[in-house]
Image (spheres, coloured by chain):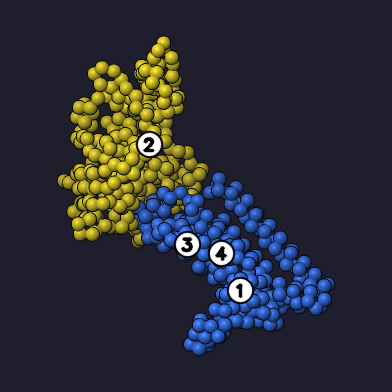
Chain colours: A yellow, B blue
Amino acid sequence: MTSLRFQATKMLHTAQGNQLFTVAFEARQGQIMALYGPSGAGKTTLLRILAGLTDTASGQIEVEGETWLDSALGLSLPTRHRSIGFVFQDFALFPNLTVREQLEFALPDKAGKAIVTELLELMELQELQHRRPTLLSGGQQQRVAIARAIARRPRLLLLDEPLSAVDDQMRDKLQDYLLKAQRHYHLTTILVSHYVPEIFRLADNVLMLEQGRVTGQGLPSAVFAGAPFKATGTIVHIESAGSAFVIRVRCAGTMIDVPVTAGEAAGLRPGQEVVVSSNLFAPQLLPVK
Amino acid sequence: MIQWLPLWLSLQLAFVTTLVLLLIGIPVSYWLAYSRRRWTVIAEACISLPMVLPPSVLGFYLLLAFSPAGGLGHFLQRHLDLRLVFSFQGLVIASILYSLPFMVNPLLAGFKNLPPHLREASRTLGKSDFTTLRRILLPNIRASLVTGAILSFAHTIGEFGVVMMIGGSIPGHTKVASVAIYDEVQSGNYPLANRYAAILLAFSFLILLVVYSVNHHFSKSKNIL
């Protein structure tokens, strides 16, 4: 059953100049849809439009038969009236509230508090429930942010790169928590992710975005099989090899050596985030930021 | 012999002014912090004017406005039976305008320093702007609230020029501590002026000590909030 119909057009002002964002897609109820693409493609913009945090020039959003946005009719449901749970990249936990209070704050008026206890157990946060966010680790804060977003039982769960700030080991654990909660509450979920392995593990469907447009959609295996190899990583070492250079990039725990010309190496430095892509002939590097 | 009435009147004036400024300052600074309208810059400049304007200039224009011969003063007296010149009510209104930047600016800085996602996160959880302000934003700018309140209180206690222009020196009504010092100096009664001045000096120092202690406490407790 289709849960979400989305269509929106908006002018994006990016570092590379103005760019038209025009995206349309549908998502089925209870599925996890991953948004994948380079920085500036419009992934976060799409989530913010869904949440009503960013305006559009024109668009239509329908969730489980309810219209949230219809620019032709001049209708735009305010954010607080959209049934969403939003996990921000920086978690956006409230510094003045304890873990339990964060979850209770998210409940609608007069809602029972049973779900708070249930979520604390599901996300293994019982022992931390009376702590404030600054006394939690990054992974713990992440679990609280996900639990808080789910507490009001939203129709749509929106996750903006929720696992980008944690190490690989922690990411695996958090993926387990996320899957457990998503399946338990059968939430239609839109997940922004840069990590292909994460998409294969979590997502039922992928929407590939580039420069504000959809360039691919379907099962992860189908979308990524049709595309050249592409992964985001961090440059760990640059070594001179005669007239060329070898750039060592760490992608999801694996080291990849990419030979580049002196001209290509000029703008690169250790610590920089890059996309490693490969066609039939040779790997290529593209700076992310 | 020292009269306590001017000091008591100063405290009353500062208390009422601070209370009203808290009620006005929170919505005004919230609007300035989050409004996208360009002319908020003009509003900010107007609110901060008393910080650079000689108090006598503000007092002079308020005197013209509140005077029964002027339009506003005439209207207030005729329709509301309210006379603002040489009255305590007039002093309160003048003090509110004079101390407005001392309340609004710390609150504005507090709101602007909060991560923008806090407000957005609350909205995505279905909360109204008022609930977000009450439950999330205000508790996280407690240091700014305390600083704004204490600075407004202290600034009102110490004002002289505006009070003199609007209220004059009517004992029991408009003769506050700073005016009493001026009167005693005019009469050559330096020992009594000195006592008033010493009390104000000690009080002002105490106030600033509290402000810095509170800020120190909040900056330390931020790490364990």
- Give the CA distance from mark 2 to mark 1: 59 Å
**Residue B23 pos. (x, y %):** 51, 68
Image mark for residue A163: 2
Q: Nearer the viewer, residue A38 or B124?
A: A38
- For label 4, count other residues whose C-alpha is less than 10 Å away and answer few (under 14), some (14-19) or many (20+): some
In front: label 2 or label 1: 1
Q: Amino acid at mark 1?
A: Gly
Q: Nearer the viewer, residue B164 or A122?
A: B164
- Give the CA distance from mark 4 to mark 3: 11 Å
The answer to the question of whether label 2 and label 4 lie on touching residues, with beta carbons closer than 8 A, is: no
Q: Amino acid at mark 3?
A: Ile
Which type of secondary structure does the marked residue at label 1 adopt? Answer: helix
Residue at label 3? Answer: B42
**Residue B11 pos. (x, y %):** 66, 72
The quadrant the N terminus of chain B occupies is bottom right
- For label 1, count other residues whose C-alpha is less than 10 Å away and answer few (under 14), some (14-19) or many (20+): many
Residue at label 4? Answer: B49
Return the chain for callout 1.
B
Return the chain for callout 2.
A
Displayed quadrant of residue B122: bottom left
Residue located at (35% from left, 61% from top): A110
Tell me how many marks there are: 4
- Give the CA distance from mark 2 to mark 4: 48 Å
- From this view, report whether residue B179 is shown above or below residue A197: below
In front: label 2 or label 3: 3
